[in-house]
Image (tube, helix red, strand yellow):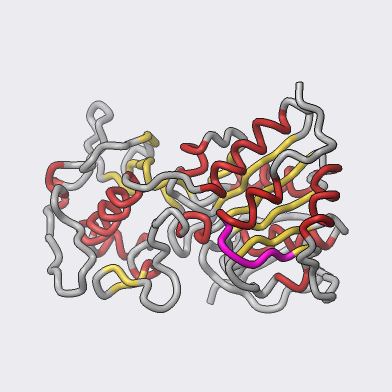
């Protein structure tokens, strides 16, 4: 059994991606029902100098990106947690690369939606006023980056980066397909058989004298998040004066503890999501509905803003 450890003021790197611990000690939240009054939120937003935006799969889902979570979240007959693991890759790298090839090809056809664009515009606009917006995302599709977000923490990595299993080389990779052997492969229907691609024909490192097997540079189930990146995220969460939680189920740790950690020190937290989550009652605001509909008017230019 893996033991999970949490501090209310200190994120720890022992936390494992994808696991859901029980009740946490030390985090005290106000259980009053959160407000859905947009005018009240807008007044808080107008005064905020440092806004942390935490986003999850719900934002990408509105762009048509499959989430592979919940009922029906299968690729062929497997769920993501049975493919996105070091053990699955060691057993069957061809199957795992087929899964990721399918996801890469799908993501290359998708575009940032109004929520992505509103966040990027807000960051750019407020930076000219000496105010700061940072985005902490669990998504690996780079849609925030494509929308124009600059202050971005991709805590689960990117599906468009690869890492060599041999030399550790990390590189961006937008090839389509990523290697010739994967062309036409990766169909998600349950009756499709595995391609059983030889390991030598799977994506390989291009560093001189290496040729090691590449893997997607995303954090897999059972792996720890980057400690340096988590330290940077912690600094943002400890200094922000407003937190937005956008399109996340608040059940995947350690990201699920980010907003409650902010709320525990009395900072307003606003949740934008299709439904309530386990963390909703601890937040100041909750706006239910598609993020692309609820978020843009919430973070649009306020009447008090001075535009240079």
- When the figure is inspected, residue 51 is found, relative to residue 274, above or below; the finding is above
Residue 187 relative to residue 288: left or right:
left
Residue 291 relative to residue 284: left or right:
left
Quadrant in the picture for the C terminus: top right
**From this viewpoint, which residue is outermost toward the top?**
308
- When the figure is inspected, residue 26 is found, relative to residue 46, above or below; the finding is below
Q: Which residues are magenta?
A: 286-291
The percent coordinates of residue 139 (x first, y second) are 49, 52
- Residue 232 among magenta residues: no
- When the figure is inspected, residue 27 is found, relative to residue 265, above or below; the finding is below
Q: Quadrant of residue 91?
A: bottom left
The percent coordinates of residue 249 (x first, y second) are 58, 68
- When the figure is inspected, residue 46 is found, relative to residue 30, above or below; the finding is above
Residue 97 relative to residue 145: left or right:
left
The percent coordinates of residue 33 (x first, y second) are 80, 75
Q: Quadrant of residue 286?
A: bottom right
Residue 56 appears in the rendering: yes
Q: Nearer the viewer, residue 296 or 195?
A: 296
How many numbered marks appear? 0
Q: Residue at coordinates 61% horizontally, 48% vertically from top-left?
A: 136
Q: Residue at coordinates 50% horizontally, 59% vertically from top-left?
A: 57
The percent coordinates of residue 60 (x first, y second) are 47, 55
Q: Residue at coordinates 76% horizontally, 73% vertically from top-left?
A: 281
Residue 262 appears in the rendering: no
Q: Residue at coordinates 76% horizontally, 60% vertically from top-left?
A: 261
Q: Quadrant of residue 93?
A: bottom left
Q: Nearer the viewer, residue 202 or 45?
A: 45
């Amino acid at each position: 059994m893996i033991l999970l450890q949490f501090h209310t003021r200190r994120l720890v790197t022992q936390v494992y991606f994808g696991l859901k611990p029980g009740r946490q000690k030390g985090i005290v939240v106000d259980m009053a029902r959160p407000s859905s009054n947009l005018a009240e939120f807008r007044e808080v937003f107008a005064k905020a100098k440092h806004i942390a935006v935490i986003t999850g799969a719900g934002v990408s889902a509105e762009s048509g990106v499959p989430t592979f979570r919940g009922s029906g979240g299968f690729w062929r007959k497997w769920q993501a947690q049975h493919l996105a693991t070091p053990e699955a890759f060691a057993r069957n790298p061809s199957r795992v690369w087929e899964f990721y090839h399918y996801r890469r090809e799908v993501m290359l056809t998708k575009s940032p939606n109004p929520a992505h664009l509103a966040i990027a515009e807000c960051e750019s606009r407020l930076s000219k006023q000496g105010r700061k917006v940072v985005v902490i995302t669990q998504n690996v599709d780079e849609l925030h980056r494509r929308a124009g977000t600059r202050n971005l923490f991709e805590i689960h990595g990117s599906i468009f980066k690869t890492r060599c299993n041999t030399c550790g080389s990390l590189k961006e990779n937008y090839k389509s397909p990523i290697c010739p052997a994967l062309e036409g492969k990766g169909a998600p229907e349950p009756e499709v058989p595995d391609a059983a691609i030889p390991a030598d024909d799977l994506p390989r490192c291009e560093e001189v004298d290496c040729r090691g097997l590449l893997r997607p540079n995303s954090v897999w189930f059972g792996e720890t998040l980057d400690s340096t990146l988590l330290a940077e995220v912690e600094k943002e969460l400890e200094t922000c004066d407003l937190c937005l939680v956008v399109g996340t189920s608040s059940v995947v740790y350690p990201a699920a503890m980010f907003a409650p950690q902010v709320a525990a020190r009395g900072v307003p937290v606003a949740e934008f999501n299709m439904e309530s989550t386990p963390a909703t009652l601890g937040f100041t605001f909750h706006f239910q509905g598609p993020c692309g509909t609820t978020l843009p008017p919430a973070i649009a230019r306020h009447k008090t803003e001075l535009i240079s």
